[in-house]
Amino acid sequence: MKWLKSWSPPWRKGAAAAAPVGSRELLEMIAAGAVAVSGVSVNASSALRYAPFFACLKVLAEDVGKLPIKLYKERETRGADVARQHPVHRLISRRPNDFMTASEFWEMCTAHLVLRGNFYAWKNIVNGVVVELLPLSPLTTKPKLREDWSLVYDVTFANGKRDILSADEVFHVRSLSLDGVRGLGALEYARECLGAGIAAERHGAKLFVNGANPGGVLQTDGTLTDEVFARVRDSWNEKHQGLDNSHKVAILEGGLKWATVTMTNADAQWLENRKHTDNQLCGMLRVPPHKVAILDRSTNNNIEHQSLDYVNDGLMPYLNRIEDRIRVSLLNERDEESHFAKFNVAALLRGDMKARSQFYKDMVGIGAFSPNDVLELEDRNPREGGDIYLTPSNMIINGRPTDENEKRA
């Protein structure tokens, strides 16, 4: 696609471009997020630094990224074939642009959906065919519904230029939406949960900075001069604050005594609060706790069922949104009727050899798969005579044994 570098950029001449963005507006777009009730400013940077949230986002993004996706063409009767010659198939399954693989592209798409609720990409269209998808920043892309119900996108590009793009020029995948235009992301609907978790994490960090000991006071019945007060304070912080100074012997002079005045972490149930917040976050994002190394209530028996629920309830909404948007946004009206995109969710079974082998055995046993179909799914070469489909001899058709049906025919 190197020749496409000369193609007209989105802010091409003759377009109805908006006015350039000023410095104040740029600052507003990159400003910190809203402040949660916990007093923590929750934005993309602070949210991604919170380990449980980053782990959940990483699980969802990487699981979508590792799933093979193909474009299929429906047959006139039943079934569908991979549309390998269609330009959109290469776009979604191998190379959406010059600098990203398909896996990287769909990982980024899912991460934007989780974080911001929207994923945008500019469609490079040549002769009516989409030949390239270039990601746009969700921070600087604003969808707007005009009075005539047409959807446009106010986009500010990396070079600071601004343009108004039509819906036909933007590949837009949105998550749960309240207005049908913009999706809701975790920074909006999970801000308080994230704020509580970040605040608890910072509390723990401060605790360990102070040698894992709660704060307190040095008290005396006498009166200290300003000079003595400053010397005692500085000397105490220098010799006893921080992990490196933990458990050192304190020498108190002039009748000074140490007294603890704050609650202990046991009293505040700090660990329990953190666990509750982390589990709540997993519930919001529909990620089983064991996926992010929270194994308190996980056993060998229920992890399998949690994993199945995760695929059905956690991943499928993202996959369906992407598949539907590919069909209506990347295909022309003619191909939209006969083509569709599909992620291969069966790839998630690759890590479980026992479950995979049982699935293949069942499919071959009922005649749905041939041995060569199984070899193809395992990326193995077919064998001679492996294209046969078995039919169990004890099966009946319309309530009659197979032999009886053949005689009637």
Image (cartoon, helix red, strand yellow):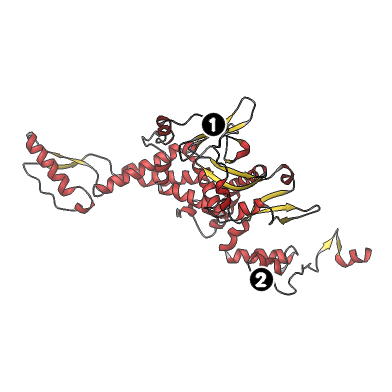
Q: Residue at x 48, y 38 (%)?
A: 139
Amino acid under disc 2: Asn
Q: Residue at x 5, y 41 (%)?
A: 254
Q: Position of residue 187 (x, y in %)?
A: 46, 38
The mark total stands at: 2
What is the number of the mark on residue 104? none
For residue 23, say whether it is visible.
yes
What is the number of the mark on residue 381? 2
Q: Position of residue 124 (x, y in %)?
A: 60, 44
Lateral position of residue 243 relative to residue 105, left or right? left
Q: Residue at x 8, y 34 (%)?
A: 226
Q: Is residue 352 above or below residue 74?
A: below
Q: Which residue is mark 1?
A: 17
Amino acid under disc 1: Ala
For residue 297, say whether it is visible.
no
Instruction: Report the front residue among 332 and 111.
Output: 332
- Callout 1 crowding tier (Cα within 10 Å): few <14, some 14–19, many ≥20: some
Q: Position of residue 36 (x, y in %)?
A: 40, 34
Instruction: Report the front residue among 377 and 200.
Output: 377
Q: CA distance from mark 2 to mark 1?
A: 54 Å
